[in-house]
Image (spheres, grey):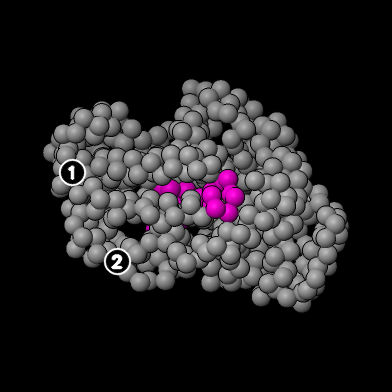
Amino acid sequence: MPVFSLPSGYGIGDFGSGAYGFIDFLKKAGQSVWQILPLVQTGYGNSPYSSVCSYSFNPYFISPEILLQKGLATKEEADFCKTESAAVDYGFLYSVRFPLLKKAFSRFDKNAAEFKEFKKSGRFYNYALFMALKYASGQKHFYEWEDCYKYRDEAALRAFYNDYAEETDFWQFIQFEAEREWFALKKYANANGVSIFGDLPLYPALDSVDVWENPSIFKLDDNFTPKTVAGVPPDYFCENGQLWGNPVYDYSALEKDGFKWWAERISRELKKFDYIRIDHFRGLDRYYEVPFGAKDAKAGEWVKVPSEKLFKAIHSVADKTRIIAEDLGIIDDGVRELLKKTGYAGMKILLFAFNGEKDNLYLPERIQENAVCYTGTHDNDTLMGYLAGASAWDKNNFIAGVKESLKAFGGALMAETDSDLADAATELGFACKANMFILPFADVIKKGSDYRINEPGTVKPQNWAVRFKKSDFDDNSAEKLLKLSVKYSRV
């Protein structure tokens, strides 16, 4: 359940009552893990996998309700942000949320000891500078700024920070408030037996705080133009490959200080979450890079990562049992060996299981304990959506495969409607040996393709915009999950 999909009257899910209500639902349903998408501030395309700052919180997740409770917003101001939109409308959010946050900041006690200590820590100093400079420059990319700011002249940055103290303090307040709301929510979840499973994108965006403050760890020229960018090569799903456009890491530079940047990043994220998933884990064995300016990802090449040294540094500060690897896509022996060496649990996707191949590693009866099983991820269609759009060949394979897998667990398929098939696939996820089974909420309530979270390689208004209603967290859904959890000893 992405945070943005939670019920809210304010156009997007947030850290307010909708999130607390969802935790109550999970407790009632006997569930012990809530997996989310990255909580970061997003940019163009609204993707949480392309952030302006990899360690930020999304300002839109600050709850207008909580601002109201704290006396930082009036009812009239909060009500102005309300909308009946069935999907997240990011244009509307931009027009109403930042004015609300500005008003909240105007009432906030900037001399509060906790806020002063927060600023003194320096954790969001560069973020606040970056955002203030971006607005002062007319929303230019950082590599288009004046050289003194672009190349981080400390005297110029200090002068700017002081001259624009109100603006920089506003961005500090954004992260201060979001962080406080998040950790209060996480504390509530943990107190109610629910662990939070976070997500770690592999790469930051080019126009990001991460690149601006650490340009030497990326493959950039002296003007901060990428020499190469990230992507994935052509495959069955995409004949031109996927050109992500993110700058890639310079591992020779990272190795000079013992991969300190990566170790600190993982350590920081494990303070926010109980578990984290490393997205595109295969990129930490070998990554695919494409020359900057290429129109597609066909002409790229694979580059080896010094992964043994990298993970030694990570494991010096992190508990490896709390890290899960997204090991999907093009997987070779190098990735399998790295997964084995790290000991991380990998991912098994049931939507990939029933294709007629008897040796398919995603078949539920073949899944072992050290894995996280899913019906599908945020990049897949929902179960009902997939079944509705499947070809006759794929549908027949799915039916036959589900029947065979049910036999392996001592069950039988009583009917062959799409709804019954979805229920059967869900039960197989509960039944398999994987230590953790994650069920997308759209599959809990059996929604169709309208509830698909993202279609990879596309920039569509539908992506990252799915919303649920409070009424979706009904007693029947909770009872269904609880019964399956008890039946398969997952409570």
Q: Position of residue 208 (x, y in %)?
A: 38, 45
Which segment did they paint magenta?
Answer: 26-48
Q: Position of residue 34 (x, y in %)?
A: 54, 48
In the rendered image, the vertical position of residue 30 relative to residue 215, given as above or below: below
Task: In the displayed orientation, state which residue is furthest to the left.
Answer: 163
Specify the label residue 82 is tagged with.
2
Callout 2 touching callout 1 (CB < 8 Å): no
Question: Which of the two discs, 2 and 1, labels the residue nearer the N terminus?
Answer: 2
Residue 180 seen in the current view: yes
- Judging depth in this view, the residue of 276 and 405 nearest the camera is 405
In the rendered image, the vertical position of residue 317 relative to residue 299, given as above or below: above
What SS does tag 1 mark?
Answer: loop
Residue 381 seen in the current view: no
Check disc 1 and give the amino acid type: Phe
Look at 69% across and 37% down and name the residue there. 339
From the viewer's perspective, tell me whether residue 378 is left or right of residue 38. right
From the viewer's perspective, tell me whether residue 236 is left or right of residue 190. right
Look at 72% across and 58% down and name the residue there. 427
Look at 17% across and 53% down and name the residue there. 103
Quarter assignment of residue 234: bottom right
Specify the label residue 394 is tagged with.
none
Q: Which residue is mark 1?
A: 108
Q: Position of residue 70 (x, y in %)?
A: 23, 47
Q: Position of residue 223 (x, y in %)?
A: 36, 42
From the viewer's perspective, tell me whether residue 160 is left or right of residue 255. left
Q: Is residue 27 magenta?
A: yes
What SS does tag 2 mark?
Answer: loop
Look at 27% across and 58% down and name the residue there. 97
Give neighbour class at mark 1: few <14, some 14-19, many 20+ (Cα, 10 Å).
some
Check disc 2 and give the amino acid type: Lys
C-alpha gap between disc 2 and disc 1: 22 Å
* Overall secondary structure of the magenta section: loop
